[in-house]
Image (cartoon, rainbow, N blue to C red):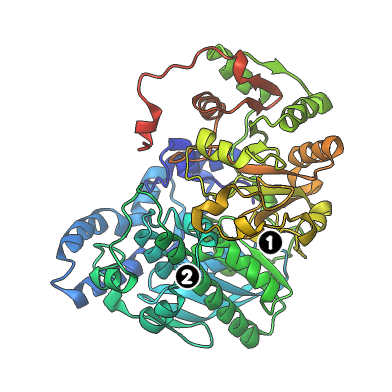
């Protein structure tokens, strides 16, 4: 693996679905090759098969969905079906254009970069061409998919339906539902099982389509669903009620139970001790944590870019190993390089930009630089950390992160409301020195990609008073649950990133220095962006995010910038309008 990038980071349009021109330019530059030197280009799904599914679905439901049909068909006929021609023209290459199936790409992204010579593979998402779930076996260079679940029956679409119904954005904010779930009670679990889905012992499921609207593409749920769940969907940006919290908890519980059933079946069929996962549902780190604790597999590895972005990784690996028949030897540390596969900037490039903005900065190198950052961290400053290569995937892992002191009782609310401009209920994740993780969390394995939620150890918890026990819903938010309140969620859990010297370099050194000064082996880590904006890519993105928010310090390359020293920041338009924020 040499490079991987997402178009949104370069264009600054979140979830940018345009042709990934900038991401391709970056990857070619990082590899040091020209388009004419490319032998193969591979796309992560098969457009004609996907078009067949869309066409067949609309025809079977006609005349319902005709409006959506009339919108979709011209786009497919003019652009998407001719992906090969588009690739050749835009890349100026005569390379062979190949196609992998959507879930084949997910499966390949899960197994081939994993640290295992052999493993079972499970992929779960909304929908690809026809498949919504698959499982199979990877052995050496060979990868075989053994079984599949087909559209419209989908665990991912079930979760997305509840995402829509609770007032969040589908295919973007499912993680908010996961974060909201601990504030609620599982009051709707029985209703979901009795009326909405039928789940078999092997984890396969069928959905009662009378309650859903996504077949016609108009909305995820319908009026019958509203009646079943006690009212209309929450309007986005309105107040969250206890009902939304209970709905979130209920669909989260069902998701975890279905995943466990699937995993038990996959283990029984394959007999493997290792499991690799990908697909959007594999980003549900609460379910992953439960699977690790209660499931049948000894080891679990999840593709850090488990969603569709990681499909590009899998498609490339599928061609390299399955089509070109190359030999594979698993890297015991995995082949994703900590997911640090994105762009990077030299000190000269960073300084040139800072000078152009009239920024006030100090250049500090080596141990002194880390000392300066740790001094500010321990003084409860919020710091933008821009170092080395950008991460690939949805998680900031110490390349483009906002960091803070986890011992602070105010850090969560400060970061949410003054830095990230996002919902107050959202929890923050810890980055912990791998060797000290067992002292803080009930976690028997590493979690390098922040994809596993684990309980905070009993001895670190703060027992609730009788009065606090009576609190419910969002009232629970301001109760300190442990001696690390900024990273401990209301259910005494945390979404853990374990950090080591080999994988994480200077980020490990920073946390170790913080531990030496404070005795605390972890820090708060959240992505370097504000709500509605992609994670920062360039020094310009980082400085603008720093100046637009109430962040205290920017640590970028070898440079330290303190907010109090900076010139006044002015913009011609309100940036919140640009990102559709209140």
- Residue 107, visible in the rendered structure: yes
Q: Is residue 131 left or right of residue 318?
A: left
Say which element carries label 2.
helix
Q: Which circle, 1 or 2, is nearer the viewer? A: 2
Q: Is residue 521 above or below residue 366?
A: below
Q: Is residue 341 above or below residue 350?
A: below
Q: Residues within 10 Å of mark 1 (few under 14, many from 20)?
A: many
Residue at left 80%, top 37%? Answer: 514
Work out how far the residue at label 1 is from the one at label 2, CA to CA, in angstroms. 19 Å
The x and y percentages for residue 321 are 61, 66
Q: Is residue 342 above or below residue 117?
A: above
Of all residues shown, which one is farthest toward the right?
516
Residue bearing mark 1:
454
Q: Is residue 421 left or right of residue 484?
A: left
Of all residues shown, which one is farthest toward the front?
467
Circle 1/circle 2 CB separation < 8 Å: no
Q: Residues within 10 Å of mark 2 (few under 14, many from 20)?
A: many
Residue bearing mark 2:
250
Nearest to the observer: residue 146 or residue 32: 146
Residue at left 34%, top 70%? Answer: 229
- Residue 33, visible in the rendered structure: no
The x and y percentages for residue 308 are 47, 58
The x and y percentages for residue 76 are 26, 58
Nearest to the observer: residue 323 or residue 420: 420
Q: Is residue 474 left or right of residue 456?
A: left
Nearest to the observer: residue 305 or residue 155: 155
């Amino acid at each position: 693996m040499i490079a991987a990038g997402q178009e949104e980071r370069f264009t600054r349009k979140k979830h940018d679905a345009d042709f990934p021109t900038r991401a391709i330019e970056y990857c070619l530059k990082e590899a040091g090759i020209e388009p004419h030197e490319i032998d193969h280009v591979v796309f992560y799904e098969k457009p004609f098969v996907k078009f067949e599914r869309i066409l067949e679905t609309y025809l079977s439901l006609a005349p319902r969905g005709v409006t959506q049909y009339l919108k979709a068909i011209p786009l497919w006929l003019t652009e998407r079906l001719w992906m090969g021609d588009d690739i050749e023209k835009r890349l100026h290459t005569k390379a062979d254009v190949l196609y992998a199936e959507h879930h084949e790409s997910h499966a390949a992204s899960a197994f081939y970069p994993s640290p295992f010579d052999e493993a079972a593979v499970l992929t779960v998402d909304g929908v690809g061409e026809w498949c919504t779930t698959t499982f199979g076996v990877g052995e050496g260079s060979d990868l075989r998919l053994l079984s599949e679940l087909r559209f419209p029956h989908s665990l991912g679409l079930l979760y997305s339906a509840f995402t829509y119904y609770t007032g969040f954005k589908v295919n973007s904010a499912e993680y908010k539902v996961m974060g909201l779930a601990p504030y609620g009670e599982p009051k709707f679990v029985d209703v979901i099982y009795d009326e909405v889905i039928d789940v078999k012992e092997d984890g396969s499921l069928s959905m009662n389509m009378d309650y859903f609207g996504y077949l016609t593409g108009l909305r995820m749920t319908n009026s019958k669903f509203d009646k079943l769940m006690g009212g209309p969907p929450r309007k986005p940006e309105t107040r969250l009620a206890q009902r939304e919290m209970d709905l979130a908890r209920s669909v989260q519980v069902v998701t975890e139970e279905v995943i466990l059933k699937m995993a038990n079946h996959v283990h029984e069929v394959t007999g493997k001790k290792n499991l690799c996962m990908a697909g959007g549902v594999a980003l549900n780190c609460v379910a992953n944590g439960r699977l690790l604790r209660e499931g049948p597999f000894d080891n679990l590895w999840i593709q850090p870019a488990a969603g569709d972005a990681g499909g590009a990784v899998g498609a490339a690996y599928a061609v390299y190993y399955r089509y070109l028949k190359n030999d594979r030897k698993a890297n015991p540390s995995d082949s994703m390089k900590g997911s640090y596969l994105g762009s990077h900037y030299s000190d000269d490039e960073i300084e040139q930009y800072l000078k152009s903005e009239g920024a006030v900065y100090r250049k500090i190198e080596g141990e002194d630089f880390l000392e300066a950052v740790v001094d500010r961290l321990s003084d409860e400053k919020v710091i933008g950390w821009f170092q080395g290569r950008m991460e690939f995937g949805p998680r900031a892992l110490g390349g483009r992160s906002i960091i803070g002191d986890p011992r602070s009782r105010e850090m969560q609310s400060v970061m949410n409301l003054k830095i990230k401009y996002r919902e107050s209920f959202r929890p923050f994740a810890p980055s912990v020195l791998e060797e000290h993780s067992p002292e803080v969390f009930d976690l028997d394995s590493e979690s390098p990609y922040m994809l596993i939620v684990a309980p905070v150890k009993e001895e670190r918890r703060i027992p609730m008073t009788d009065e606090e026990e009576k609190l419910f819903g969002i009232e629970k938010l301001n109760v300190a649950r442990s001696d690390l309140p900024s990273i401990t969620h209301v259910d005494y859990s945390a979404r853990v990133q374990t950090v080591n010297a080999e994988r994480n370099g200077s980020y490990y050194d920073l946390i170790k220095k913080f531990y030496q000064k404070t005795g605390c082996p972890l820090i708060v880590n959240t992505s370097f962006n504000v709500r509605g904006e992609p994670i920062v890519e360039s020094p310009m993105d980082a400085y603008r995010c720093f100046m637009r928010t109430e962040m205290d310090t920017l640590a970028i390359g070898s440079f330290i910038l303190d907010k109090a020293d900076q010139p006044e920041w002015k913009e011609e338009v309100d940036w919140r309008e640009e990102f559709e924020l209140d």
